[in-house]
Image (cartoon, coloured by chain):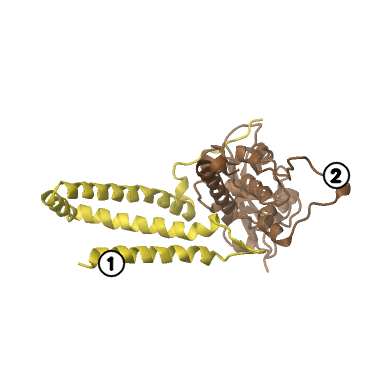
Chain colours: A brown, B yellow
Amino acid sequence: MANKTIRLEILRYDPEKGSAPRFQNYEAPYHEEWVVLDAINYIKDQMDGTLAYRWSCRMGVCGSCGMMINGTPKLSCAAFLRDYYPNPIRVEPLANFPILRDLVIQLDDFMKKLVSIQPWIIRKEGEKPVKEGEYLQTPAQHARYKDFSMCINCMLCYAACPVYGLEPHFVGPAAIALAQRYNLDSRDEGRDIRQEVVSSHDGIWQCTFVGECSVVCPKHVDPAGAIQQAKLASTMDWYKSLLWPWGGK
Amino acid sequence: MKPYVRPISAGWWLKRSSYLLFLLRELSSVFVAGYVVLFLLMIRQLAQGPAEYEAFMAALRSPLAILFHIVALAFALLHTITWFNLTPKAMAVWRGEERLPAAMMIVPNYVGWVVVSGVIAWFVLRG
């Protein structure tokens, strides 16, 4: 039996040359159990060592191998060749991010936004000493935020979000979902602090609820849901401050 | 060393069916607003007397006006149904460790729609 191959059309960009990116075709071996990342690793090892891309765990945990695969943001370790064969597969760096080289994107903007929502537990009086024990939580309290805590920061949601593409200042799906994750945590007291970013002009109100972020999320985080729930909570805050005596405090 | 920023094409909303549906949903508000304006004009004509009102109603029977109403109805349905179905995303109601199923958020919207439409139909059609 002849060895089967599959064509990968990979976007290449060389920052030293500075010319526009172009597609380069590779005929990689086809194996039914291979994912796109396996084929790219083969190309890097056997065909073209100059190809640059990010990957680490190859099992959908680290979140570093996100790419546009036939125009859809996917983890390349979770996209099987057999779902595309015998058609060629077009591989591009994640949309809406600047390209550093080939499939490697510049993620500084996302990192900055992630930090801006302070994704950690904030205690108003500071954390109590370790010897006083843990902050206890019931299973029901844990369930409130568990789904939002599954985010692996793979940025597929940013690549799927047309609002982020058109308005790069938008804080974006994953960062807001993580803000909501901590806001909903019974141990956290930092919602008022996060609101300055979350409820700002560049925060939740930029979202027009396209919903594609939740569709592409490999961890079923539902950032679109998180954003709408944050909008609802912020709207309730506003009504309370308007209608309740002493601003509902 | 210069990062390359890819331009966004003017036709980005044609690239995915979900983008197109989103854009149509946004566009629907224009037709809903247009119908509201028409409705307010009708009330104004009604206040000015039977002759003015009859003239206005005659104008509404033109093919163009009927076409507008059909298109506006289609967009109003798209607007209503898509937003009704998105309600569970915005409203997370918990009972202990379980979140209420999405259907329990969606169905009351439709029940309310049918009841309100029924009441209005009863007022309009009772003669």
* SS under mark 2: loop
Q: Position of residue B77 (x, y in %)?
A: 37, 59
Q: Nearer the viewer, residue A154 or B74?
A: B74
Can you identify the residue that label 2 sits on? A129
- Among all residues in the image, which is located at the extreme front? A245
* SS under mark 1: helix
Q: How many marks?
A: 2
Q: Position of residue A48 (x, y in %)?
A: 71, 46
The amino acid type of the residue labelled 1 equals: Trp
B91 lies left or right of A61: left
**Residue B13 is at least partly visible in this image:** yes
Q: Quadrant of residue B126?
A: bottom left
At 19% across and 55% down in the image, what residue appears?
A: B63
The amino acid type of the residue labelled 2 equals: Pro
A120 up-or-down from B121: above or below: above
Q: Chain of mark 1?
A: B
